[in-house]
Image (cartoon, rainbow, N blue to C red):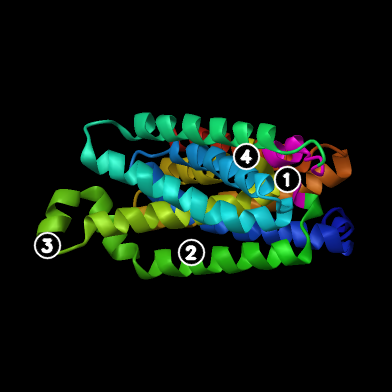
Amino acid sequence: MELFTEPLSFAFMQRALYAGLAVAVVCAVIGVVVVQRGLAFLGDGLAHACFGGIALGLYLGTDVEDAVWLAIPFTVAIALGIGFVLRSSHLRGDVATGVFFSFSFALGVLFLGLRSASARPVNVESLLFGSILSVSPQVLDVVLIVSVVALIVTLLLWSRLAYAIFDPELAAVSGVPVAALEYLLLAQTAAVIVVAVKTVGVVLVSSFIVIPAAAGRLLGATLARATLLAVVFGAAGVAVGLVASYHLDVPTGATIILTQCACFAVAFAVGRH
């Protein structure tokens, strides 16, 4: 037990655990829906869109902490743009996401380059790879609030979301607002990814969306079972990865993702038998 209790005796490790679990749970629930919809690439695209939003905030003179508030509406707008292109053209989800991915990331690089020479230097590496161990109490509050709200909304609309995903045509005929649900899913996914970027960074955040959901789908015969398993895999990846990184003295975000990948490997092996 000391392996787990020793790291959690520090306040920064406790904040990292709370933030990581909140992000892992909500990303797992949303991820199952996103993966089933065929938008696994969405998480990566919106993470890079978040980078553009944060860079815009920095260009306007805010610090990294406050830039998140500007990044949320920016990323939500990008997500709605992806949804509009998907519904208005014959392009696949990965193509539409790739276009906005490139636009947002390039815009972020441009905004960073346009900052004045006297502006406070920005640690771009922390934006790309995150720093879950440096989560402040203020950031933790934002992570918890956004995660809880997104989780509640998703669970309240769960039956309609599932119906709209598996048979959108029949759902529309039955009176289910398929388009509105899809836009809502995209918008809240964007908001969750923005706060998740504060913990694991732009590069790794999509893993929280895809890996636990994919592992859950390998073993879950139903959407509900797959979601429950995804939550377990995501939370276990955070807890075990966080403790392992402390004892091994290695980067925390990468260790968490590798632990989730190990969960996927186990699910894949079990699912084959």
- How much space separates mark 3 and mark 2, taking CA atoms? 25 Å
Residues at marks 4 and 2, CA–CA distance in whole angstroms = 20 Å
Locate the N terminus and report the quarter of the image it occupies.
bottom right
Q: Residue furthest left?
A: 173
Q: Are marks 3 and 4 in contact (CB under 8 Å)?
A: no
Residue at the spot of label 1:
241
Which of marks 1 and 3 precedes in the sequence? 3
In the figure, residue 272 lies in which quadrant? top left
Observer-side mark, 2 or 1, equals 2
Residue at 30% in and 58% down:
181
Q: Using the image, tell me which numbered label, if any, was put on residue 150.
A: 2
Mark 1: which secondary structure?
helix
Which of the two marks, 3 or 4, is nearer to us in this view?
4
Q: Secondary structure at mark 3?
A: loop
Label 1 to label 4: alpha-carbon separation: 18 Å
Front residue of this view, candidates 184 and 175? 184
- What is the magenta range? 119-132
Q: Is residue 100 above or below residue 21?
A: above
209 drawn magenta: no
Q: Quadrant of residue 260?
A: top right
Amino acid on which disc 3 is placed: Ser
Mark 4 falls on what kind of element?
helix
How many other residues sit within 10 Å of disc 1, few (<14), some (14-19) or many (≥20)? many
Task: Give the mark count.
Answer: 4
- Amino acid type at image mark 1: Gly
Name the residue carrying label 4.
202
Distance from Cα at disc 3 to Cα at disc 1: 44 Å
Q: Which residue is mark 3?
A: 174
